[in-house]
Amino acid sequence: MALKGLKEFENKLNAVGKVSASKRLWGQIGFQAIDIISQRTLKGKDYQGAAFTRYNKTYKLWKQKRGGKFFSGSPNLHNSGNMFASMKARSTDKNVTLFFSKPLEAKKASIHHRGLAGMPKREFFDLSKREQDDLLELLRKKLKKAING
Amino acid sequence: MADISDKALDSIEKEIEATLAAINAKIARLIGKLETTKGDVLAKMELSRMRATRKAIIKEFMAFDTVANESTKFNQIGKAIKSRIKPVSLSFTQSDNALLKLLSDSAYGELSGITSQYSERVSMAVIRGSIVGANVDDITLEVTQLVEGGTDLAGRSMASHAKTLVNTQYMEVDAAMTIRAADNIGATHFRYSGSLIKDSREWCQDHVDKIYTRKEIEGWGSSSWAGKKEGDPFITRGGYNCRHYFVPVIVDG
């Protein structure tokens, strides 16, 4: 019986090791982080939950005309969709990095996030403490699933 | 990778050479810009990015010993840095070999076609433009020249479609990269993400912000709607000029 228990424990440990050191899992966490960033930005909020600096009058009018009934009035950093479509996750077995696949989109993102080139700073490309905790919770669930089979 | 004919290899080699030439020209322009506008942060970032991309291309495709040695050193430094960083990190400017892979893997086959005569040339121009950081207008100019004189299946001028082709394929390049990444991480669910405008198709209005399984998205192939583009639904999504994108998500924890 003891031996059986030890074997089961060993299997569980192996399963945990496999999941926690998994490039796949970190990749999944990375894309989940992208989803969090994208959904929050679409709501017009930065990573700390604050509303983005509002549009200037001229740009707002243009966005209003283009958006029609879907125009919310809040900046959401979506125009062509190219910048967010370009956000990607690259993982190793220890961590994951979010980045922009195209240099032009990386530059646009940097301008928005850092407030360069005369644009207002809209810090979207980051994760709040709560968002990080949510991602950790997902990791915990995955590990628990691996332990319990 | 599937077998590639000599002709296809020659074509890829030419595209890689053209990409390197475009990058070299851009580096030269950026250096010129830096000389005239001292302290331009963005130009410096872009220059650094261009040099990194050039290095990655050479590393990926040209087996020069000296470059390989440099790459080894670079990797060692990279590993040392990585061991100290937090699990989820964010980087604006990291160079991405996935774009180069698209170039080398004849990925223009994945970006669904216009007419076979033009699809390859247009797709390669868009991928090349994406690598060197060209904007959509610049790529459109190149594509307009590429297809000048040609007509589509309905006999209309191809040049008049250039902007739509570029807009559409520029997004498809990223869609192709996402689905490849999703395959690698075993993703099973995807959110159809993005914003809506007054011209958004009903299809996109109905589907945006919702989460779908792989099978459900594959099923889009057999549905029809105005503006739909034939091809892999993970790549063509809502169709021509579609502004939406898939994000792999975890639904079961």
Image (spheres, rainbow, N blue to C red):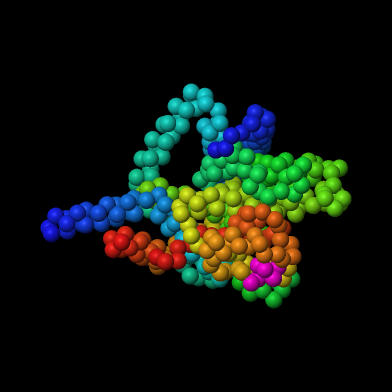
Q: Is residue A28 left or right of residue B229?
A: left
In the rendered image, which quarter is residue A9 located in?
Answer: bottom left
- B226, above or below A99, in the image: below
Q: Is residue A24 visible?
A: yes
Q: Quadrant of the C terminus of chain A?
A: bottom left
Q: Which residue is painted at 59% across and 59% down in the image?
A: B218
**B58 or B98: nearer the viewer:** B98
The residue under the point 53% across, 47% down is B93
Choose top left, top right, bottom left or bottom right for residue A74.
bottom right
What span is colored magenta in the figure?
Answer: B201-206
Give the residue displayed 52% in from the left and 24% down from the top: B64
Q: Is residue B109 left or right of residue A17?
A: right
Q: Where is B150 relative to B237, above or below?
A: above
Looking at the picture, how far across and down is residue B164, in whole percent?
75, 54
Q: Is residue B203 magenta?
A: yes
Q: Quadrant of residue B199?
A: bottom right
Q: Position of residue A76 (x, y in %)?
A: 60, 66
Labels in figure, total: 0
Left or right of residue B145: residue A139: left
Return the x and y of residue B186 as percentages of the image width and height: 46, 54
Q: Quadrant of the N terminus of chain A?
A: bottom left
Report if residue B48 is visible in the image: no
Residue B56 in the magenta stretch? The answer is no
The percent position of residue B181, horizontal first and vertical second, equals 51, 50
Camera-side residue of A45 and B168: B168
> Residue lying furthest top in this view?
B65
- Height in image: B218 above or below A55? above
The residue furthest left is: A2
